[in-house]
Image: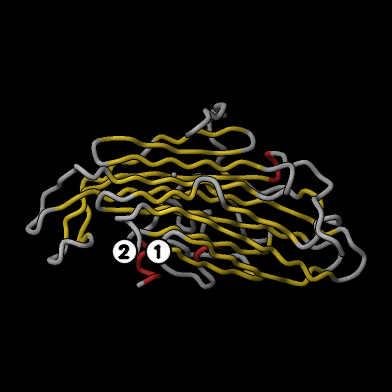
């Protein structure tokens, strides 16, 4: 079957997104190359629209922003993230310090397979990221993308980021753990990092039965310290091998944001769990 777009137009009933951005003080390690600890966290301001979400923050330590939008062309989320640590900022610590800046965004869309025979669905994700020269190569400076195909049963997109099972859990975990008390059935999942300017590609697959519903979850993170820049704002691309027999399926959401604000152009977790998972 040739690749194509889905027949349905994305709506809020089938798309949900959330995000956060932050800046923090970074106390250097003895080599003064990485952050040994973080303190004095400031979080950004989130905005929501019927088909997207975004976050932004800017202070003396740096700036970051995110954006998620439902894309009627590919019928998959468009995610963008950007983080910049201010080169001149100095924080305390026995070995001196700088700043840590992060931008994280995630989205979920729902689908129903309308074909009459089983179908092998493949989702391919490509990410290009640009790192400033002083940011490349550091283990704490990275761009991360995670993607999953998972069951609609047992999942609710929760805008409460302190919930026992956060809405991004199916993208970052396959078994229950801290921060992800319960999980739906995960059909396929992958997560990869870039630590310097470059490109990565992820492909995950599952076999769909006639009438089956499923969610696609995706997460993008840009994280940087010590005066660097990580730009993942233009080049995350997602594509099904074929979407002609997919239709929209609602994402279970609770609670909905109180106010849907229109997005402003140019508008962001690297959760501690992701950092622990990588180590």
The coloring applied to the image is: secondary structure
Name the residue rendered at 62%, 51% in the picture.
108
Task: Please state which of residues 48 and 76 is positioned toward the viewer in this rendering.
Answer: 76
Residue placed farthest to the front in the image?
Answer: 133
Give x and y (percent) for residue 64. Answer: 38, 42
The residue beneath circle 1 is 195
Task: Please state which of residues 106 and 81 is positioned toward the viewer in this rendering.
Answer: 81
Name the residue rendered at 32%, 61% in the picture.
140
Give x and y (percent) for residue 155. Answer: 61, 57
Residue placed farthest to the right in the image?
Answer: 116
Mark 1 lies on a secondary structure that is loop
Q: Earlier in the sequence, mark 1 or mark 2?
A: 2
- Is 222 left, or right, of 122 in this rendering? left
Q: Quick check: 59 above or below 122?
A: above
Give x and y (percent) for residue 235. Answer: 56, 50
Q: Quick check: 20 above or below 274?
A: above
Task: Please state which of residues 196 and 103 is positioned toward the viewer in this rendering.
Answer: 196
Q: Quick check: 51 above or below 197?
A: above
Give x and y (percent) for residue 179. Answer: 42, 61
Location of the C terminus (image quadrant): bottom left
Name the residue rendered at 72%, 47% in the picture.
250
- Mark 2 and mark 1 in contact (Cβ < 8 Å)? yes
- Is 119 left, or right, of 147 in this rendering? right
Q: Residues within 10 Å of mark 2 (few under 14, many from 20)?
A: some
The residue beneath circle 2 is 138
Task: Please state which of residues 111 and 166 is positioned toward the viewer in this rendering.
Answer: 111
Mark 2 lies on a secondary structure that is loop
């Amino acid at each position: 079957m040739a690749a194509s777009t889905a027949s349905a137009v994305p709506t809020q009933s089938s798309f949900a997104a959330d995000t956060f951005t932050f800046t923090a003080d970074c106390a250097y390690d003895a080599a003064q190359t990485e952050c040994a600890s973080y303190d004095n966290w400031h979080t950004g301001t989130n905005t929501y629209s019927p088909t997207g979400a975004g976050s932004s923050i800017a202070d003396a330590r740096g700036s970051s922003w995110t954006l998620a939008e439902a894309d009627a062309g590919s019928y998959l989320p468009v995610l963008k993230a950007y983080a910049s640590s201010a080169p001149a900022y100095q924080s305390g610590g026995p070995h001196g310090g700088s700043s840590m800046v992060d931008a994280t965004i995630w989205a979920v869309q729902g689908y129903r397979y309308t074909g009459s025979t089983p179908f092998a669905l493949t989702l391919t994700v490509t990410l290009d990221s640009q790192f400033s020269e002083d940011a490349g190569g550091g283990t704490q400076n990275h761009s991360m993308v995670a993607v999953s195909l998972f069951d609609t049963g047992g999942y609710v997109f929760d805008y409460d980021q302190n919930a026992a099972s956060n809405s991004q859990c199916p993208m970052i975990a396959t078994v229950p753990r801290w921060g992800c008390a319960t999980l739906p059935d995960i059909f396929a999942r992958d997560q990869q990092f870039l630590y310097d300017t470059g490109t990565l590609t992820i492909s995950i697959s599952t076999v769909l039965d006639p009438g089956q519903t499923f969610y696609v979850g995706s997460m993008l993170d840009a994280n940087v310290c010590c005066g660097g820049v990580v730009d993942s704002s233009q080049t995350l691309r997602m594509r099904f091998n074929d979407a002609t027999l997919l239709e929209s399926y609602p994402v279970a959401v609770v609670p909905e944001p109180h106010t849907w604000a229109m997005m402003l152009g140019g508008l962001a977790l690297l959760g501690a769990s992701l950092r622990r998972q990588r180590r």
